[in-house]
Image (tube, rainbow, N blue to C red):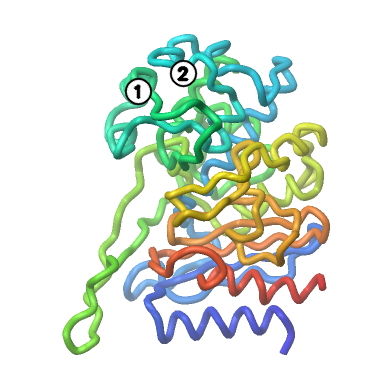
């Protein structure tokens, strides 16, 4: 059986037998599409389509990585530039030494128990709350994945450097040049984007199997807040194009969106050698806004990769040496733990058969 058929069989089996609702799968090698398919449902009783705008959740952060990368060149910034050089109020409560690399490699140990307030309030108040937050350890000394908070800083930095709102900058300089016409960041119809209907993400929860093994109906969660860390929706092929642009030195769809030297900064590990409780105590290497550790994607050990995962809903990953790009987006959360045992990680391993 060839690698694509093996991956497709694995997905169909998971939808038929496990708690999986619907999945979009895209893969390419050296920019040439090898699979662009869809399986299962967007919601119970409604088929999932190739063009459906599936939640990217945390993979949204790749947009911030690329936006910052563009502006670094223009404004002569480096990964070691202190955040306070652009957002002075961030210096409060001992954060004056926090650098761009600290924020975007998740090495800022905020002294908080929950990031929910950064998501449930408006952008201005969220930034003020984050600026007031103190640290529990020096920046860079501990790993602490920031699912929400740090990308408030990233969005503010992009807005102040560019002079336009974050979502507008992303649309003009990333989504539009790459031809991502079905990707939405922000409210439908905003920032010059045509109306795209964002799908919810469905979930059953972790402990909802009945006494006789039956499953209840999945419950939708609508992620309509235009949050810079989790708010993008789009098809798998369009998320994959972001990763293709990184794998191909900053160019995709006939447009250069990043200089090769900036791609190198994004794909170089700025944090490694420290465990992260968010990822179950794994030591996960992070670049500038992107994960560069094969363990999180199911890629072969030692592979040079770049990409992101999306909170129990999929991943997008590219191999910088082999040219393989895989994007696996699901319409539901599936609680399967971390690392190589997850469905999407096994699909990635199947598709590596294309380039071995």
Looking at the image, residue 159 lies above or below residue 217: above
Asked which quadrant contains residue 231, the reply is top left
Residue where numbered disc 1 is placed:
133
Label 1 sits on a secondary structure element that is loop
Q: Which mark is residue 95?
A: 2
Tell me the CA gap for discs 1 and 2. Answer: 9 Å
First reached walking from the N terminus: tag 1 or tag 2: 2
Residue 288 at what x, y percent from top left? 64, 36
Relative horizontal placement of residue 218, taking residue 260 as reference (left or right): left
Asked which quadrant contains residue 327, the reply is bottom right
Badge 1 local density, few (<14 within 10 Å), some, or many (20+)? some
Q: Are marks 1 and 2 in contact (CB under 8 Å)?
A: yes
Residue 340 at what x, y percent from top left? 57, 69
Label 2 sits on a secondary structure element that is loop
Residue at x-position 69% and y-position 38%: 266
Asked which quadrant contains residue 21, the reply is bottom left
Q: How many numbered marks does the figure carry?
A: 2
Residue 349 at what x, y percent from top left? 66, 73
Residue at x-position 61% and y-position 45%: 273
Looking at this view, is 205 or 9 the one in front? 205
Relative horizontal placement of residue 9, taking residue 2 as reference (left or right): left
Looking at this view, is 233 or 345 the one in front? 345
Residue 352 at what x, y percent from top left? 73, 71
Q: Quadrant of the N terminus?
A: bottom right
Residue at x-position 22% and y-position 73%: 208
């Amino acid at each position: 059986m060839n690698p694509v058929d093996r991956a497709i069989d694995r997905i169909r089996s998971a939808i038929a037998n496990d708690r999986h609702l619907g999945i979009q799968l895209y893969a390419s090698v050296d920019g040439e599409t090898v699979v662009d398919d869809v399986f299962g449902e967007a919601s119970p009783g409604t088929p999932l389509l190739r063009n459906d705008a599936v939640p990217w959740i945390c993979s949204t952060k790749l947009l911030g990585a690329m936006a910052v990368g563009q502006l670094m060149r223009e404004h002569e910034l480096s990964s070691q530039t202190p955040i306070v050089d652009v957002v002075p109020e961030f210096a409060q409560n001992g954060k004056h030494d926090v650098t761009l690399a600290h924020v975007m490699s998740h090495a800022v140990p905020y002294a908080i128990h929950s990031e929910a307030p950064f998501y449930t309030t408006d952008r201005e108040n969220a930034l003020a709350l984050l600026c007031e937050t103190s640290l529990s350890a020096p920046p860079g000394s501990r790993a602490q994945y920031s699912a929400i908070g740090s990308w408030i800083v990233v969005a503010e930095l992009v807005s102040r450097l560019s002079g336009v709102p974050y979502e507008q900058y992303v649309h003009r300089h990333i989504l539009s040049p790459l031809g991502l016409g079905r990707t939405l960041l922000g409210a439908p119809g905003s920032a010059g984007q045509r109306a795209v209907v964002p799908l919810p993400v469905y979930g059953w929860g972790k402990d909802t199997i009945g006494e006789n093994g039956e499953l209840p109906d999945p419950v939708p969660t609508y992620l309509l807040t235009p949050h810079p860390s989790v708010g993008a929706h789009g098809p798998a092929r369009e998320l994959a194009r972001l990763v293709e642009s990184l794998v191909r030195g900053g160019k995709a769809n006939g447009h250069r969106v990043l200089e090769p030297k900036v791609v190198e900064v994004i794909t170089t590990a700025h944090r490694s050698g420290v465990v992260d409780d968010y990822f179950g105590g794994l030591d996960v290497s992070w670049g500038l806004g992107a994960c560069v550790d094969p363990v999180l994607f199911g890629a072969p050990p030692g592979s040079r990769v770049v990409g992101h995962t999306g909170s129990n809903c999929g991943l997008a990953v590219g191999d910088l040496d082999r040219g393989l790009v895989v994007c696996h987006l699901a319409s539901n959360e599936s609680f399967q733990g971390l690392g190589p045992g997850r469905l999407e990680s096994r699909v990635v391993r199947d598709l590596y058969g294309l380039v071995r």
